[in-house]
Image (tube, grey):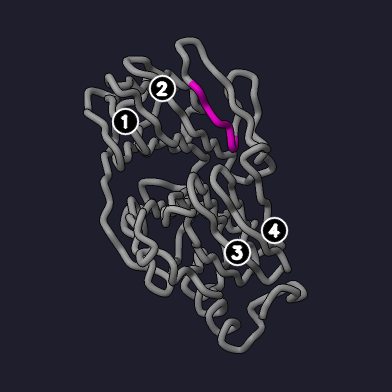
Amino acid sequence: MQRQIKGIYRGEPVTEGAGVKLHRVFGYYEAPDFDPFLLFDDFRSDRPEDFLRGFPWHPHRGIETITYVTRGDVEHGDSLGNKGVISGGDVQWMTAGSGIIHQEMPKGDENGAMHGFQLWANLPAAQKMMPPRYRGLTAAQIPETELPGGVRIKVIAGRVNGVRGPMDDIVIQPEYLDCDVPALGSLTHTLPRGHTAFIYVTGGSGSAGGEALQNRTLVLFDHGDSLHVSAGPDGIRFLLVSGKPLGEPVAWRGPIVMNTQAELEVAFREYREGTFIKHPQTGMP
């Protein structure tokens, strides 16, 4: 059964971090419909003043943050001692688990452009306090496959056409695909029944379920076995994301997501008292 459209989201501009202007496509209020995903931000900008203030040192607990950069550079560092630069085509998959403190400082490219996306995925109660871990993928480590009709897909997580993405051992069994469908072409993609699935258009135009799609349109699909997207005369490019819902209560305040208000209070008290980090801090200034 082909999935029908459950909702269309276009988001709104917000300011986060130390003054970064970005486009929040869904977040706190919409999160129940996107379980296990919590938030999705589009931070594409060609104006350095929109992003250079960045996201200085801040904590996370109970979630995973997935950053996909398509243009420009982001300098990062964390309390595990990881540091470096995420560049165009690279992915940073950070599992906060029991707690991590990190910073992300966008620098853009030589033309002052910074393009990318950040997705937050929830962790189930049993893994909320797992040891944190950081995994960085360069563009060269992300495989690409071509389907009949010229559809090209970069496979970050999941499996397409026999090609498996490098991100595995993830609790919510996610798919994260960057799909490029040529002019007037189409893509039908099979998904596990019961998994939450959405696409986010990053270029071109097309349609799904009788609805017109354009840049910065997010489509949340209902239940079924597959989804279908058709490209317009200029082709269409989109991110396709799916994952297994957790079906658990969510207690969320800022960068920390737990299951109960009591757990939230513990997390913020530990942060104030300096006992938030459960691993040796090797990367803090």
Q: At 59% across and 39% down in the image, what residue appears?
A: 173
Q: CA distance from mark 3 to mark 1?
A: 31 Å
Residue receiving disc 2: 181
Q: Earlier in the sequence, mark 1 or mark 2?
A: 2
Alpha-carbon neighbours of circle 3 within 10 Å: few (<14), some, or many (≥20)? some
| Residue occupying image coordinates x 41% and y 51% | 40
Does the residue at mark 1 contact the one at mark 2 (Cβ under 8 Å)? yes
The image quadrant where one finds the C terminus is bottom right
Relative to 119, is 101 on the left or the right?
A: right
Give yes or no for contact between labels 2 and 4 (Cβ–Cβ under 8 Å): no
Instruction: Quickly name the residue at label 4.
Output: 133
Rendering coords of residue 213 (x, y %): 26, 31
**Amino acid, disc 3:** His
Q: Are marks 3 and 4 in contact (CB under 8 Å)?
A: no
Does 250 sit above or below residue 91? below
Specify the quadrant of the image occupied by residue 269. bottom right
* Residue named by callout 3: 76
Q: Is residue 30 visible?
A: yes
Q: Residue 204: give its label.
A: 1
**Label 2 CA crowd tier, 10 Å (few <14, some 14–19, many 20+):** many
Asked if the residues shown at circle 3 and circle 1 are in contact, with their CB atoms under 8 angstroms apart, the answer is no
Between 180 and 27, which is closer to the camera in this rendering? 180
**Mainly helix, strand or loop, the magenta region?**
strand
Alpha carbons under labels 3 and 4: distance apart: 14 Å
Give the SS element for disc 1: strand
Q: Earlier in the sequence, mark 1 or mark 4?
A: 4
Magenta highlight range: 152-157
C-beta proximity under 8 Å, tags 1 and 4: no
Q: CA distance from mark 2 to mark 4?
A: 34 Å
Q: Is residue 254 visible?
A: no
